[in-house]
Image (cartoon, rainbow, N blue to C red):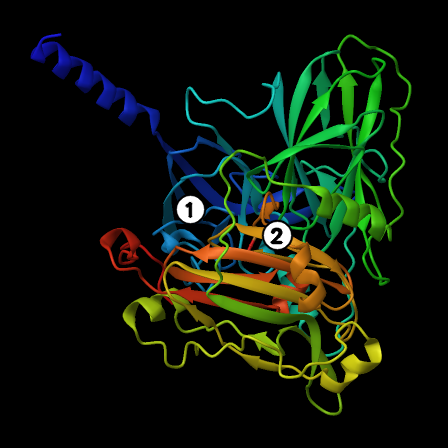
Amino acid sequence: MTRAMWLLVCTFMVIAFVASADVVKHTFRVGNLTVKPLCEEWVVVAVNGQLPGPTISVHEGDTVVVHVINESPYNMTIHWHGIFQQLTGWADGPVYVTQCPILPGNSYTYRFNIIKQEGTLWWHAHVSWLRTTVYGALIIHPREHRSYPFIKPNREFPIILGEWWNANVVNLEAESRLPGAAVNVSDAYTINGRPGDLYQCANNNTYTIEVVHGKTYLLRIINAALNNELFFMIAGHNLTVVGIDALYTDPYTTDVVVLAPGQTTDVLLVANATPGSYYMAARAYLSAPSQFDNTTATAILQYKGVTSVATPLMPVLPEFNDTPTAHKFYSNITALSGWGYEVPLHVDVHMFITEGLGMEPCGQNATCTLGSMNNESFQLPTKLSMLEAHFSGAVQGIFTDDFPDTPPLVFDYTNENASQLISTTRKSTRVKRLAYNSTVEMVFQNTAIVSVQSHPIHLHGFDFFVLAQGFGNYDNATHRSTFNLVNPQMRNTIAVPVGGWAVIRFRADNPGVWLIHCHLDVHLSWGFATAFVVDNGPTPSSTLPPPPADLPRC
Ligand code: C2O
C-alpha cells in the first residue's frame, strides 16, 4: 500500500471513529400539565407535556446535552440517575449538592458523556418531591457494531413504575416535615404513567404491549415510585434478568421481580404462552408494617392476532410482606461472568454506617422523625451548592468534612429496646472526604430506631459491588468470610434488607461531591443522606474542570 493510500485509510478510520460517538441533544421544557390518571383532574409538573417524560436513548460513548427550561412555578433540577458524570459533576443535579436550583423562568444545560456503562438508567427531578411526575428513561445501547451479551430481542419496551397522589406533591413534601406528620399514602401506582384497569375511572387507558408468539422482548423496568419497593410480574410468563442498574448480570430466570425506588431491571421475555392477553402487574413490597398504598397497577401483554374479549389473565403476586421472596431476588443476582467487572481487593477506607430513622425534640414536648446515618441527619445548605463551595475551597458555613466512620455507640442495632438508647439524631451537614482513587468499603446496618424497614441506598457518581447482605446485625468475624469477591452484583442502589445489613465496595475515581441517600423520598426529606467529597487526582484527566458558565446561582 502506498503512503497516500494509508493516509486515506487512516482518515476514514478517524472519521468512522468520530462518527460513532454522537452528541444527543434534547430540550426539556418543564411546565404544568393537566392529567387525570384517576377520577380527578390534577395540574402536575412534567417535561414537554409528557408523563412519563421523554426517553433519552444513546449509545455508549455518546455525549448528552439537555437544555432544561424551567417554565414551572417551582425550583427545578434534573438528576441523571446512575450516570457516572466522570469529570462532569456539575451536571449531576441534586439540589444544593452539585448546583443551585434552576429558578422558575431560568434554564440550565446539562452536558455529560456516557462512558463504560450500558443498559437502563433514568432521569428525574432532584428537588422536593417533584420527581413524582418529572422522570423518564435513559437507555444506553452498546456502541455501534457491538452487541448485547444476550440474544438480540425483537423489540424493547421501557416499563416505568410510578406512584401517584391526588395531591400537590410540593405541599405533601412540606407537610411530611412537620412535627408529628402522618405518612401520606399514595393513591395509585402507575405503569408508564397509567394506573390500569383495577382502578376506578381507568378509562380504557391501560398501557398495552403487543407481542408476536415465539419472539423475544427486552423489558427495561424502572422503579420511579417515590416511597415504595414494588413487586412486578407478568401472568403466564417467566422473566430472565440480564441487567440491573445498567450493569450486566448472569441470566437469572424468575417469575417475579422486585425493585426498590431508583433501581432498574432488564428482563428478557419470551412470548411463548398460549396466545391471549395477560396482565403485567406491580404492587408494593412492604418490608415492615405501616400504612401503605395496597393498590395494584396493571398493563397488558397482548398477543398479536388474538381477538378474544376475555379479561386478561392476572398474575398471583407475592403477599405484601413477602420478605423471603424479595430477598431471594435481591440476593441471588450475580454480575455477568467474564465481562470484566473487577472487585477491588485492597480497601483503603472502612465505614460502618447505622442507618434508618431517628428522633429529635422539636417544640413543646413534641418529637420529629428524622432520617439518620450514624446519628447524623443531613441538612442541605441553601446559600451555595456544596460542589461550588468545594471547588472554590470556601466550604465554611456550607459543610464540614467530619462525617463519622462509625456510629456513636455500639448496640444491638436491630433490637427495638436497645435502639431506644440512642434514638436521638442531630442535624448537620457533615460529609466524608476521600482521596482520589481510594477504595471504600461500607457496611450499611439498618437499625430498629423508630422502625425497622428496608432502605434503598443510592450512591451518586459510582457503581458499587454488593459483597454480601443479610438479616440481623453485621458481624465482621463471621460475615466477612461470606463476601463474594468473584462475581458480586453491581448496582447504584441497594435495598438493604429489613432489620439487616449489606456490604458494598467502590473505587472513588471521580472527583466531585456525591450524595449518598435513601431513595425513599420521604426519608430523603427527613435527612437520610450524607455526601462524599472526592479530591482531585494528580493529572488534568483526574481534575474537576470549572463550572459551566450557565450554572444556576443561588
Ligand atoms: Cu435517583 Cu439522588 O437520586
Q: Quadrant of the N terminus?
A: top left
Say whether mark 2 is within 8 Å of ligand 1.
no
Q: Residue drawn at (63%, 59%), measured in percent from left and top?
A: 503
Q: Is residue 154 above or below residue 437?
A: above
Tell me if 29 is positioned left or right of 539 in this view. right
Give whichever of 438, 267 is nearer the camera.
438
**Dot 2 alpha-carbon crowd within 10 angstroms: few under 14, some 14 to 19, many 20 or more:** many
Per the image, the residue denoted by label 1 is 68
Q: Position of residue 61 (x, y in %)?
A: 38, 34
Residue type (three-letter) at the residue carrying disc 1:
Val
Q: Position of residue 397 (x, y in %)?
A: 40, 81
Q: Is residue 274 above or below residue 295?
A: above
Q: Is residue 325 above or below residue 243?
A: below
Give whichever of 297, 256 is nearer the camera.
256
Q: Position of residue 67 (x, y in %)?
A: 39, 43
The circle on residue 462 is none
Per the image, the residue denoted by label 2 is 466
The answer for how far apart the CA atoms under marks 1 and 2 are is 34 Å
Q: In the image, which is nearer the foreground, mark 1 or mark 2?
A: 2
The image quarter containing residue 257 is top right
| Residue 520 visible to the viewer | no
Give whichever of 105, 333 is nearer the camera.
333
Q: Are marks 1 and 2 in contact (CB under 8 Å)?
A: no
Ligand 1 sits in quadrant: bottom right
Q: Quadrant of the C terminus?
A: bottom left
Badge 1 or badge 2: first in the primary sequence: 1
Q: Residue drawn at (45%, 31%), measured in percent from left and top?
A: 58
Residue type (three-letter) at the residue carrying disc 2:
Val
Give whichever of 531, 187 is nearer the camera.
531
Say whether mark 1 is within 8 Å of ligand 1.
no
Badge 1 marks a residue whose secondary structure is strand
